[in-house]
Amino acid sequence: MVYPDYYTRFKCTADKCRHNCCIGWEIDIDEETLGYYDMVPGDIGQRIRDNITYGDPSCFKMTADNRCPMLNERGLCEIMLNLGADSVCDICYEHPRFYNDFDTHTECGLGLCCEAACHMIIDNKDIVKLEGYTDDMRSDPDVILRDRAICCLQNRSKPIAERINDMLGLFNIADCSLSIPYWTDIMYSLERLSPDWTRCLDLIKEHFSRDALRDFRQHMQSRQTEYEQLMVYTVYRYMLGCHPSPAAAALLAYLSYSVIEAIGAAIYGATGEFDLDTQLEIIRLYSCEIEYSTENVGILLDTLAENYCNN
């Protein structure tokens, strides 16, 4: 198992979470847990079964306000409270963790759609290290390439723009300039879940400019680690085994930074303010809208490869 050094420190904030993962998402039930729910006795067992839509896959019947029916008024799971943490379905037990399986190992991480994970990752001032490498893995050419990409992004002796150029240079991508209006239109064309994300894109249309970006970068001069951590996360999560190419994953990290920075510049240009909480909410929304749709990720990777990769 390979994982970032912060991975084992994660803890769900449960009822203190402002964006409960039991609200707004379809919650699928794996077959093993479904069989267990069919056998649970008593009122809690009957209540669980009454709130399942059986099918392929089976899932919980969401309430009119899009909440899991097993979520109580305090924002806590009645299944977990009555039957224990091991009684919830796989997706609830694992979220926001992700796993990438390879022939030699499995890589673990935490998704940025979770506000607690997002805060842990983005507000981390330390240089992230990957734990669990074996000697054989360290000698793998793909792992070496990814480590070099991460090393470029973590070179704090250089400004963030130079780090990005160094990373893209590993893939023979030179002078890559992403057009914010073009990529904003691409984002509009993707599947969108939340009107909050649409409002973020609207802000770019209404308030983004070169002058706004220049002023915003000055404002963010002491907060470059937020973008470093975002891109290191993206490279770690997507580069190994990336289709159509590892270069596309490097470009996805650059695109993620560019779009999130553009939203920040638009907000700062309109309000003169931009704090950490606002940054974390933009990144959380971006992750929900992009990362948790395999179709959206695929469209971005393919479009980046077509536009900027030479091979």
Image (tube, grey):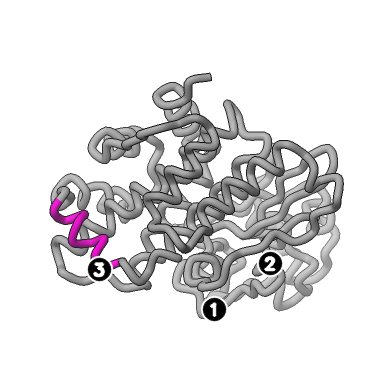
> Can residue 143 be seen here?
yes
User: What residue did someone put label 1 on?
Assistant: 15
Label number found at residue 40 = none
Query: Which residue is tagged 2?
Result: 5
- Tell me the SS state at disc 1: helix
Which of the two discs, 3 and 2, labels the residue nearer the N terminus? Answer: 2
Mark 1–mark 2 distance (CA, rounded to whole Å): 26 Å
- Circle 2: element type: loop
Q: Give the position of the N terminus as an image quadrant.
A: bottom right
* Most foreground residue, 156 or 26: 156
Q: Give the label, 1 or 2, closer to the camera.
A: 2
Q: Nearer the viewer, mark 1 or mark 3?
A: 3
For the residues labelled 1 and 3, the Cα–Cα distance comes to 34 Å
User: Residue at coordinates 67% horizontally, 35% vertically from top-left?
Assistant: 241
For residue 196, side relative to residue 288 (left or right): left
Tell me which amino acid carries mark 3: His
Return the x and y of residue 196 as percentages of the image width and height.
31, 55
Q: Position of residue 308 (x, y in %)?
A: 42, 26
Please name the residue that numbered disc 3 is placed on: 219
Q: Is residue 65 visible?
A: no
Q: Earlier in the sequence, mark 1 or mark 2?
A: 2
> What range is drawn magenta here?
211-220
Does the magenta segment cover residue 219? yes
